[in-house]
Image (cartoon, rainbow, N blue to C red):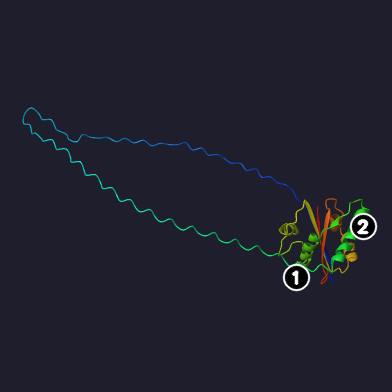
């Protein structure tokens, strides 16, 4: 069987974005208008002779006040729409059966801490929850026929950890395929610079190990 190993590591960094808002001042403008009123009647003056007197036109009748329009009925208040039910929360994936592989996880932990002690580093502790989700990653690779840090189902290992509620300041992942024993997979990881760096990182305090026997899929999750 072809054997493969990959490694992946990430540190969280804070980034800040400066948002600058510009105030736009708009000066108020006012329009002025004038209306001119004329007298209601005008008389034309006459010359001394041959005068034609033009009668002053009578003042126009004041027009009737317009009728007050009927006040329209107040429209009915529309019914308040019902609040839709929140969507169902997606169910958690089925956990692989780790009963037969928990001893493998313990053996990997022992081998990891042996290497760390030889390099003056503190021991990691094995976390059951982290191991269960590391096993989900191994099962996902097996079921979907891929070998990569990026899952077509869950995304990056860091997205996957967060989706399962795993918090961390530092995180890393080692994966392998085609190895049937803890000793064999640890030898392969320690002979790879990237995998070795994760195993011997001083940033990590906790380890999770997931294993699927069919195909020999391994996942190590480190957090700190």
Residue 124 at x, y percent in the picture = 86, 55
User: Which quadrant holds residue 8?
Assistant: bottom right
Q: Residue furthest left?
A: 50
Q: Measure the alpha-carbon separation of dots 2 and 1.
A: 32 Å
Q: Secondary structure at mark 1?
A: helix
User: Which quadrant holds residue 192?
Assistant: bottom right
Residue 175 at x, y percent in the picture = 81, 63
Q: Earlier in the sequence, mark 2 or mark 1?
A: 2
Figure check: 38 above or below 174: above
On screen, residue 31 versus residue 81, left or right, reads left
In front: mark 2 or mark 1?
2
Residue 108 at x, y percent in the picture = 88, 62
Crowding around mark 2 (Cα neighbors within 10 Å: few <14, some 14 to 19, many 20+) is few
Residue 203 at x, y percent in the picture = 83, 51
14 or 24: nearer the viewer: 14
Q: Residue at x 87, y 62 (%)?
A: 106
205 or 75: nearer the viewer: 75
Q: Residue furthest right?
A: 118
Q: Is residue 191 visible?
A: no
Q: Which residue is mark 1?
A: 143
Q: Is residue 189 visible?
A: yes
Q: Residue at x 79, y 63 (%)?
A: 132
Q: Secondary structure at mark 2?
A: helix
Disc number for residue 114: 2
């Amino acid at each position: 069987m072809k054997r493969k190993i990959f490694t992946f590591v990430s540190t969280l960094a804070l980034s800040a974005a400066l948002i600058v808002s510009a105030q736009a001042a708009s000066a108020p403008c006012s329009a002025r208008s004038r209306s001119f009123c004329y007298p209601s009647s005008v008389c034309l003056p006459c010359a001394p002779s041959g005068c034609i007197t033009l009668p002053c036109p009578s003042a126009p009748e004041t027009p009737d006040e317009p009728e007050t329009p009927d006040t329209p009925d107040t429209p009915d208040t529309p019914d308040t729409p019902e609040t839709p039910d929140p969507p169902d929360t997606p169910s958690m994936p089925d956990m692989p059966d780790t009963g037969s592989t928990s001893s493998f996880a313990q053996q990997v932990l022992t081998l990891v801490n042996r290497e760390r002690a030889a390099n003056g580093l503190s021991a990691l502790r094995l976390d059951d929850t982290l191991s269960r989700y590391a096993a989900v990653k191994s099962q996902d690779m097996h079921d979907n026929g891929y070998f990569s840090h990026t899952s077509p189902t869950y995304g990056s290992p860091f997205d996957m950890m967060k989706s399962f509620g795993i918090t961390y300041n530092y995180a890393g992942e080692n994966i392998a395929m085609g190895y049937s024993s803890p000793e064999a997979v640890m030898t392969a990881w320690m002979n790879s610079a990237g995998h070795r760096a994760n195993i011997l990182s001083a940033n990590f305090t906790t380890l999770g190990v997931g294993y699927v026997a069919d195909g020999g899929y391994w996942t190590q999750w480190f957090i700190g």
